[in-house]
Each structure stands twice: as C-alpha cells, then as structure tokens.
Image: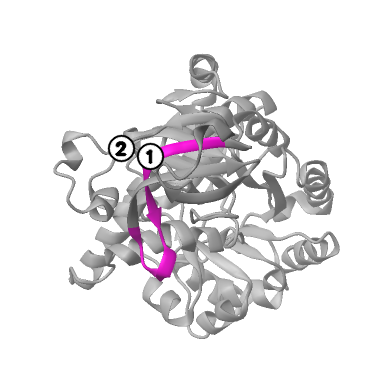
Amino acid sequence: MTDILLKNCDVLSFEGGKAHVEWNQDIAIQGNAIASISKHGSIQENECKQVMDVSGLLAVPGFINTHAHVPMVLFRNLAEDVTVEEWFNDYIWPMESNLTEEDVYWGAQLGLAEMIENGITCVADHYFYMDEVAKAVELAGTRANLVWAVFGHQGEEMLDKTVEFTRRWQGKADGRITTWLGPHAPYTTSPEFLKLCAEKAKQNDLGIHIHLAETEAQTDLSLKEFGVTPVKQVYECGVLDVPTILAHVIAPRGDDFEILQKADTGIAQAPRTYLKHGMGLAPIDQYKEYGIPFGLATDGAVSNNAMDIMEQMRLISLFTKFKHLDPTVMKIDEVLDITFRGSAKVMHMPDRIGELKAGRLADITLLRQDGLHVTPRTNQLAALIYCARASDVDTVLCNGKVLMQGRQLLTLDKTRIQQEVQNRWERLSKRLPGERIAFYPA
C-alpha cells in the first residue's frame, strides 16, 4: 500500500529540462521516497494508509540551504550596521565565547523550526558542538550535512575530535544525517593544517565544507602572504581532492575557474548576506560558463537575519539583473533551476533531492496559492519567485514524514524552543572581553 497520498495539488516539474507546473496531481509516497506522480484520481484512496487533501497547494521540492550556521539564530539582530571586520572581531567571536553545548542544542532547534516553517528540508550546517546539532536534526526530522568548524590554532587534537563526531553520526537519523569535515577557512588555518584536513578526509572517506575567497580583501591577502589565491591554496593543499561545499567564493581570480571546474564541488550563494555587508556578488556568469554548480544559502542569521531561501531566490534574480543593468538576464527557469537542482548538486545529492519525480526522496514543500499577493493566478512560476512568501508554506515533508501540516509544527515544540532561547538572550548577548582576534582580514 501507498503510505501517504498527497491528493490534488499542483506540482512544480522539471520534466523535459524546463520548469513548468502540472495541475491537479496526486503524489504517492512509499517509505522515504516518491512512488509516483499522476493525474488526480488515478490512485485508489483505499489503497493508501494516509490521504492528505492538499487541493489548491503548489508542491515544490523541499527547499535546500547549502550553507548555514544554524545555531547562530541565538545572536540574531545583535551585530548591525558594522563592517565585516567589526562584525567578526567585535561581535561574533566575543559573543560566541559564551556558548555552551545546551545553548547550541536549543539554537539549532530554533533554526530548524524556522527553516521548516520556511519550507527548507535540507541544510549544510557549519558550526560548533555539532553533536547537539545532530540531536536537534534527529528530533526535527530534517535532512542535514553537518560539519564541526575547526580552526588552525586548535591543532590536530581538535581536528581528530571532529573526525570522531563524523563517525558517531554518519548515516544516522534514518540516513538523514551526513557528516563531513569543516576547516573554517584558509585565513584561519595554515596550509599545513589544510593539508592535514585533506588527508584525514581522504582516510575517512569524507568531504569538506569550507569558507573560501569571501571578499576581495581575502584574495589580496592570500596573494600577498602565500603568492596564490585562496582557491589555488586549497587546491594545492589537497582539499579539492575530496567532495567539497565551498561557501561564497565571491573573489576568485585567474585560473581559479579552471581549478573549480575540475573539482567535485559546489558553491553556496547567500545574496542577502552580500548585500547587507557590501561584499558584492560572486561571478556566477563565469560559474555558469564553466559548468561549476552553485545553489542558494541563508548563511547565518546574524549576517542576514532570516533563514529564508525564498528570499535568497528572489534576491539572486534581482541582484543579477541590477548588476548587469539588464532585465532579461536570470530568467525564471534559471532561477528555479539554481534554487532546486543547482542546490541539490551543491549538496552532492543531484539524483536524490531537488526535483519531484518517482524514485526521488520524498522531501516536499507545499505552498498556499490563495493569498491576495499572488492573485490573480496567471503565472505560477513568476509568482513563486517574486510574490510568494515563506509564510505561504503550509505543509512540509522530509524523508516521507510530515514535519508540518497546516502551519502546525509536528516534530518540534515551538513554544518551548522560544522560551529556552529567550531565557538565554541576556547572557549570550554579552561580549566577553579578551584579546582581539585578527582572524578576518580588513
């Protein structure tokens, strides 16, 4: 029998290579995967264990967040109108010095709950105390690639602890959790430490998730200190010999594109962060030209304040049109392809998520289409990008399980999470005194 039947919804489809909407469809789910998508009425309801009438809703693949610091929602709105250097050195590092494991657990729950409400079913998270994040993911029912961020000054002992974390959680939560290694960035690690990370990743069959070439200043500093770009440095250190997720890569230079083209990699783009910090936009035209996969990310909620991929989808289109002074670039089909299939490639799961079709994992987001802001219903694809809001998300499934229905969270206690986080706010907002850490180049 079919486990779940999603009855009579519209479905975003990429069949034939071009995004379009199939009307009045039934989605049959068996176990953790989509069994079939067919015209409404073609599946006998008495052959289904659970029937959910989702008439009028638009089913899209679960949104994918390719780079985040989920528990950083704890510090939301506490570092505003400052330079990137001040953001790190005067706010983030001093406040993060307060963190306990329990803080991270509740911060992760808050971020995951917000993402479920926003239709996000999969995230690549890069933070600390990742056992606590893994526990929260297991409870929430979402999918995650988790890495424990490590800095060069912490040494091999800390790196080995992060390797042990990967062994504890790899494939856990019914296969929803993937674990990799997470050296923070070339500017916070030495080439020797990056080589060590690459070696341990190879030895343990792991990938690497790392920040790279986030600003022009970083690339300039790398050229000055090492004679190579950050991209060339991680290549020479062997980091790109394993699967990677590269966060941002706003400032590649020269033959960096050829290096990235040959790597098993994907690039996470968070345009709201770049706009807010005045960082510029990555050269996505060149990424497209070289066939380098890229997708969408929220980054941390301290750098852009919200865990909302739908806004990133809208912004990457508007930002690109503005940059080129050309309204014909970044067309609707391309925006949707980046949002779903591009992000699935970045997660190294192109044949499992990012598209609704038989055999794919049942990670599904259903959105209401009856709001004044999407009326009249003329072009559903344009409405999805330019009109729809995260608050339109009605129902969310991941791995064949219902996580939210009718805007009601089913796996997480929203009220308890808000209370726990609010009770921690005063302590966590204090910036602990200490030596200024010159991690981030001005």
Main secondary structure along the magenta-highlighted residues: strand
Q: Is residue 19 magenta?
A: yes
Q: Please provide percent x and percent y for residue 40.
A: 40, 44
Amino acid type at circle 1 is: Asn
Q: Position of residue 70 (x, y in %)?
A: 54, 39
Q: Secondary structure at mark 1?
A: strand
Residue occupying image coordinates x 51% and y 66%: 213
For label 2, the SS is loop
Scheme by which the image is coloured:
one colour
| Image side of residue 63 versus residue 173, left or right | left
Q: Residue at x 21, y 54 (%)?
A: 379
Q: Position of residue 303 (x, y in %)?
A: 42, 44
Determine the residue positioned at 66% across, 27% down: 100
Residue 67 is labelled as none
Label 2 vs 1, first from the N-terminus = 1
114 left or right of 392?
Answer: right
Q: Which numbered marker is on residue 56?
A: 2
At label 2, counting other C-alpha atoms closer than 10 Å, the crowd grade (few under 14, some 14-19, many 20 or more) is some
The answer to whether residue 277 is visible is no
Label 1 crowd (10 A; few <14 / some 14-19 / many >=20): many
Above or below, comparing residue 100 to residue 309 in the picture = above
Q: Quadrant of the C terminus?
A: bottom left
| Tag 1 residue | 8
Write down the region rendered in magenta: 4-20
Q: In the rendered view, does 165 fall on the left or right side of 141?
A: right
Q: In the image, what residue type sits under mark 2?
A: Gly
Q: Where does residue 61 sit, x and y in percent of width and height? A: 46, 49
Whether residue 131 is visible, yes or no, is yes
Q: Is residue 441 magenta?
A: no
* Image: 417 above or below 86: above
Q: Are marks 2 and 1 in contact (CB under 8 Å)?
A: yes
Along the line of sight, the residue nearer the viewer: 420 or 327 = 327
